[in-house]
């Protein structure tokens, strides 16, 4: 490594271009993403700059070798967040000073990072779409240097959000049309909570408890009270009266702090038969739901809904299918992926040029396929294209992956969309579009694909005859 004391320092740029205060920020003050990366990304970059390989044209792909055990499909989520992260991937003065002082990067590398901007191209599956083993859900093309440093942030976003969306989709299916509220903020990292709310909304959740998710992404929010609200008042009646007077009779009253039957009676006495809903958070939920429904009806509150919460997952939601429940609140299981907290996505180099490139590169011509050959983790070299083969009635039959641009049939669906063109984001879309897409693509699957029981992927992944595994 070059000694910083004996080298001319790189131009660290204008601090205003990165925001004030801590260097990791963009011009609008939004936190930057350049240091959301692994140390080895920069050691690879440094060595590649010295060898000259850094300027070779390269194609990386994100894919999953397998789905979580027993799952039949995965859901793509996080693409919109990733596009934001790529735009904010800048090394600002304070970050560059940190890298010099800690001797993480030499002066050649620091000069490169000081002017880093991703100038390549990217394609990907649209958010809300489904993926299967081998699906190239993200394709990144650029020089090796500019593409390799995006690996960590791309995987951290896509692995988390896709895992949450995949679990959420199963919960929405289990709920069979009854609304679900995402309420896992207190069970995960504060930033992950916001991303989880966004991913769950894509997969069909109706709302979230997280206000930052509403502020940042427009996800509808909802919430009324916890047990602490009841306990801080002199009586349950006092608590209910205060809540109804403040929020109106359409509010939701929590009825399991003490005795559920007595609380339901008190709730109707206070709010009247127009009470919006009661929430049950503990106990034998199926039995309590039946008892509460019967009691509400006997009191004339036939339109008062029953919401249940309390460590629910897709299986307990399905078990409540015959219970008189009107909605569910899901927390811990959702934000931990319901047993699969990561989508097991990887970011792999699949093609490269023999020589360094200069200005501009488009398409896949002149690239040599490359792939790892290690036992248990073999790769498939070459830049991929993907089509979902469908019947005349639009039922999905197979995920078809090839090394050549596709020639889809009349019912087939091309899966890769342009996301970034020569460094400019071109693939943004409203969150509502991803939500609607997910509803539509689920309808393409054969009926057995929506079963919660363990099984194989809903459709096979077929690699074309021009594809090869190395």
Image: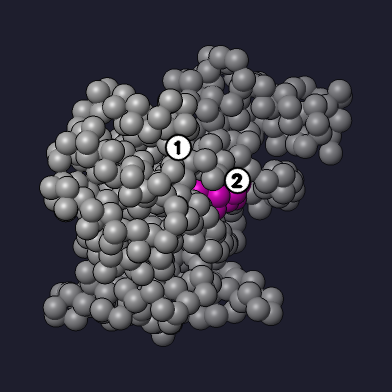
User: Count of labels shown?
Assistant: 2
Image: 172 above or below 406: above
Task: Give how far across and how far down residue 51 sits, in percent.
Answer: 73, 50
Residue positioned 28% across, 54% down in the render: 292
Q: Is residue 10 left or right of residue 444?
A: right
Q: Quadrant of residue 230?
A: top left
Image: 461 above or below 423: below
Q: Main secondary structure of the magenta part?
A: helix
> Quick one: label 1 or label 2, which is nearer the N terminus?
2
Q: Which residues are magenta?
A: 145-159
**Quadrant housing the N terminus:** top right
Q: Quadrant of residue 126?
A: bottom left
Image: 293 above or below 181: below
Residue tagged 1? 227
Which numbered disc, 1 or 2, marks the residue closer to the eye? 1
Query: Callout 2 environment at 10 Å: few (<14), some (14 to 19), or many (20+)?
Result: many
Q: Is residue 131 left or right of residue 36?
A: left
Nearest the eye: 3 or 134: 134
């Amino acid at each position: 490594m070059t000694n910083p004391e004996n080298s001319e320092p790189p131009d660290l740029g204008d601090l205003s271009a990165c925001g004030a205060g801590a260097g990791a920020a963009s011009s609008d003050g939004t936190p930057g993403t350049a240091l959301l990366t692994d140390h080895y990304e920069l050691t690879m970059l440094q060595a590649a700059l010295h060898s000259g390989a850094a300027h070779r044209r390269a194609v990386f792909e994100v894919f999953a070798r397998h789905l979580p055990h027993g799952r039949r499909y995965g859901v793509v989520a996080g693409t919109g967040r990733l596009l934001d992260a790529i735009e904010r991937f800048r090394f600002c003065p304070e970050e560059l000073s940190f890298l010099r002082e800690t001797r993480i990067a030499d002066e050649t590398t620091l000069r490169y990072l000081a002017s880093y901007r991703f100038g390549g191209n990217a394609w990907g599956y649209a958010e809300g779409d489904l993926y299967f083993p081998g699906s190239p859900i993200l394709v990144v093309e650029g020089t090796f240097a500019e593409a390799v440093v995006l690996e960590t942030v791309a995987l951290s976003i896509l692995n988390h959000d896709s895992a949450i969306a995949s679990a959420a989709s199963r919960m929405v299916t289990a709920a069979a049309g009854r609304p679900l509220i995402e309420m896992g903020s207190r069970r995960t990292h504060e930033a992950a909570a916001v991303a989880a709310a966004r991913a769950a909304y894509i997969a069909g959740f109706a709302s979230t408890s997280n206000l930052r998710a509403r502020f940042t992404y427009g996800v509808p929010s909802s919430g009324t009270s916890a047990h602490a609200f009841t306990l801080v008042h002199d009586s349950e009646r006092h608590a209910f009266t205060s809540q109804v007077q403040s929020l109106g009779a359409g509010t939701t009253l929590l009825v399991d702090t003490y005795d559920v039957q007595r609380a339901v009676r008190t709730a109707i006495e206070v709010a009247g038969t127009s009470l919006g809903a009661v929430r049950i958070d503990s106990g034998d939920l199926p039995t309590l739901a039946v008892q509460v429904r019967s009691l509400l009806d006997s009191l004339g509150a036939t339109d008062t809904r029953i919401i249940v919460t309390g460590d629910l997952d897709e299986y307990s939601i399905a078990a409540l299918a015959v219970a008189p429940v009107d909605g569910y609140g899901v927390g811990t299981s959702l934000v931990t992926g319901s047993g699969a907290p990561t989508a097991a996505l990887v970011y792999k180099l699949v093609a490269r040029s023999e020589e360094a490139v200069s200005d501009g590169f488009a398409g896949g011509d002149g690239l040599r396929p490359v792939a790892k050959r290690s036992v248990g983790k073999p790769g498939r070299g070459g830049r991929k294209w993907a089509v979902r083969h469908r019947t005349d009635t639009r039922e999905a039959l197979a995920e078809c992956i090839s090394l050549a641009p596709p020639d889809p049939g009349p019912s087939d669906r091309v899966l890769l969309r342009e996301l970034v063109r020569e460094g400019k984001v071109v693939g943004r879309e409203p969150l509502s579009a991803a939500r609607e897409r997910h509803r539509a693509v689920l309808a393409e699957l054969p009926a057995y694909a929506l079963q919660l029981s363990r099984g194989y992927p809903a459709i096979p992944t077929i690699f074309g005859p021009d594809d090869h595994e190395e």
